[in-house]
Image (cartoon, grey):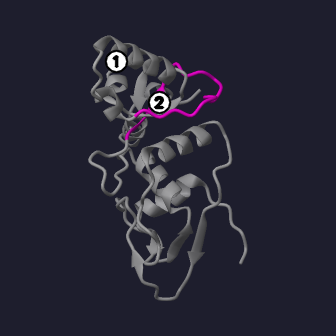
Amino acid sequence: MPKVDISIQELVNKVRRGELTLPEMQRRYVWPATRVRDLLDSLYRGYPSGTILVWETDEDIETREMAVRATDNPITSQKLLLLDGQQRLTSLTAILNGEPVCVRNRRRPIDIIFNLEHPDSPPSDIMEVEEDDFTTDVEDIEDEETAERDIQEEMKKRTFVVANKTLQNNPLWISVSDIFKKNRSGNSEADRNKFGR
């Protein structure tokens, strides 16, 4: 079987057109928000993100739909099954479609936001803050406010983070899905360049 290089955009387009499906044996989409964030950060920095294995077959195989829905009409009758890379490709398809990433058993969709004033280097530590961390019960309000300020200072050192209410209200942080949603609807070149360097 020959190796064929296909761009991420073309794979995403195949998912959009319903030309790429999952074999029935594949598990459902399960990635947590932090994995989606890390994938975007890796791609943004040009780091390798692993291979995606697709099988072209004429056999009649039981399939399941991807966690993101097809929005366009197929342009080929070619049957492609995604054997490896479902979590990455599902995440990227949702982000590039400008749709929030929905995960089973999660109340809200995953939304990743981009720091317009991010540092050039990747973060040196690993830290993740869920929105619930801002609402935990702490006896001393002053300590809570100090902790929240420290968390916000740490977030400023990141390029991508999982959205929370505090950062979503900050104009220096923009939703990655919103950027691509605007691009698909044909907004100006200035809007498209917000995300690039």
Image point (42%, 60%), residue name? 29
Q: Horizontal placement of 49 versus 24: left or right?
A: right
Residue where numbered disc 1 is placed = 144
Residue 114, label in figure = 2
Q: Horizontal placement of 121 versus 59: left or right?
A: right
User: In the rendered structure, which amino acid carries the disc numbered 1?
Assistant: Glu
Question: For the residues marked 1 and 2, what is the alpha-carbon distance in whole angstroms?
Answer: 25 Å
Q: Secondary structure at mark 1?
A: helix
Badge 2 local density, few (<14 within 10 Å), some, or many (20+)? many
Span of residues in magenta: 111-129
Is 184 one of the magenta-colored residues? no
Residue 77: image location, x then y, percent: 46, 77
Image point (45%, 62%), residue name? 15
111 and 166: which one is in front?
166
Instruction: Tell which tag, 1 or 2, sits nearer the viewer.
Output: 1
Residue 172: image location, x then y, percent: 43, 19
Is 126 one of the magenta-colored residues? yes
Q: Horizontal placement of 13 versus 106: left or right?
A: right
User: In the rendered structure, which amino acid carries the disc numbered 2?
Assistant: Phe
Q: Quadrant of residue 84?
A: bottom right
